[in-house]
Image (spheres, helix red, strand yellow):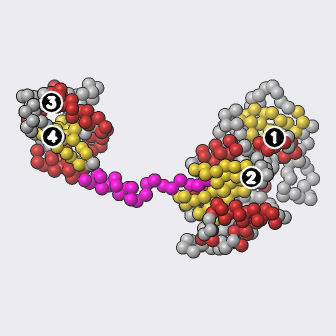
Amino acid sequence: MHTSIQFDPYVGKRNCRICRGKLYEFLKYEGVPRRVQHLNATDVHDDRNPLLIAECEECNTVQTMNDPPSYWKHGNRRSGGISAKMMEYRKRQFTKIFGKDIEKRAFVEYGETTHLGPHLSILRKMGVKERVKGMPPQEITGALTYSPGPTFSPSWPHHHYDAALCLSYLEHVPDPKALLQNMKKALKPGGIALIEVPNFEMMKKEGMWAEFMKDHVFYFTQETIHALVKSVGFVIKSCNETWDDYIITIEAYKRPLHTNYLEIDKFDIGKEKLLRSIEGKLELYQDVAIWGASHQAMMIVSQLSKKMQEHVKCVVDDNEEKQGNLSPGTNIPIVSRKTYKTMITSAIIVIAGSYSSEIVNSIIQGEGYGECGFEMLAKLFTIEDNEVKEVEIWNDKGTGI
């Protein structure tokens, strides 16, 4: 018997397994078998609880409100293998997605408990070896090790695999986000994930009510599976309806790390260059003012040696809230322009990020450089390309000061 729940939308029995949003129950089926896989002739008892289908108010993912059969932990059972038509389809699909050098890639499949699963068998026939050269010996297997609760703990190393498959299994898992996070960790940066789930849009369009079962925890649309896969950090290359629109196929990849060694070296090189340039000016002029109590200035001054910090007489800033305080960690007084006029230094170094040019102009124009203003006694510098550069100052006669 089937009834549609039109009222009392917040049944309060269970929140969304993905986002913890409130569930809206909209379908109820009585007398539904508690399992349709892993059948056991001695198991004559059935689940008397009705099958409850709900939609999350927050992420719109359709899901059951029932506990899934415990055998979801053991993966899919495809004892009958796959058809010749599906096998040819998989060969074409794998070649297109994983490239002609597929035999050089290391694969892992989620949802297959042994290395004898049909998809991994297809990969072997396509030339993929059971053990991968140049890597720690690892069987190509989808076996998972489960810790208490929905957390996945892989038996393979992190950042090891070139490609991961999860084909018609994610919908069985109570915490699909945990599985996807685990998959992302198992992949190398740039590694490819191929994910397939039944298409709930097709079910709705064709009124395929018999597709509901207690074995499936989730019923994904393109929108909801796309959002889920993206939420764990995968970059989605494509998300399409396939296999006569019965399946949603997602091809995604693990974003390569941005902090590679060359980029990290740029930080170190830039730091060394700038500190060497600043310390050269400090040694030359002895008494120097830093203009701008910016976060950049505080960071740079903190990295100077203690001996060099002693040559920084003050930090000048126009922000009244900063004036009268000490620079954090280095204890250099932060003063106003007016106060600075009483403590002239040999040089000024402007360190204010994107505001540096604006501050340089305000110093020159606002204080009357060369007209007996205090700045005429100090050399003016700013930071460009991680180097201290002197500011050229010209008077009305066109001669330098």
| Sequence-wise first label, 3 or 1 | 1
Whole-angstrom CA distance, mark 1 to mark 4, is 73 Å
Q: Amino acid at mark 3?
A: Tyr
Residue 99: quadrant of the picture: bottom right
- Of residue 99 and residue 29, the one placed in the foreground of this image is 99
Give the number of the disc on residue 205. Answer: 1
- Of residue 350 and residue 313, the one placed in the foreground of this image is 350
Q: Which residue is mark 2?
A: 242
Percent x, y of residue 162: 59, 63
- Is residue 147 at all visible to an observer of this figure? no
| Sequence-wise first label, 3 or 2 | 2
User: Is 235 situated above or below 111?
Assistant: above
Q: What is the crowding at mark 2: few (fewer than 14 residues within 10 Å), some, or many (at least 20)?
A: some
Q: Mark 3 vs mark 2: give the one in front.
A: 2
Q: Which residue is mark 3?
A: 340
Which residues fall within the magenta stretch? 252-273
Q: What is the crowding at mark 1: few (fewer than 14 residues within 10 Å), some, or many (at least 20)?
A: few
Q: What is the crowding at mark 4: few (fewer than 14 residues within 10 Å), some, or many (at least 20)?
A: few
- Of residue 197 and residue 20, the one placed in the foreground of this image is 197
Give the number of the disc on residue 149. Answer: none
Percent x, y of residue 339: 15, 27
Give the number of the disc on residue 392. Answer: 4
Quadrant location of the N terminus in the rendered image: top right
Element at label 1: helix
Q: Decide: marks 2, 4 in contact (CB < 8 A)?
A: no
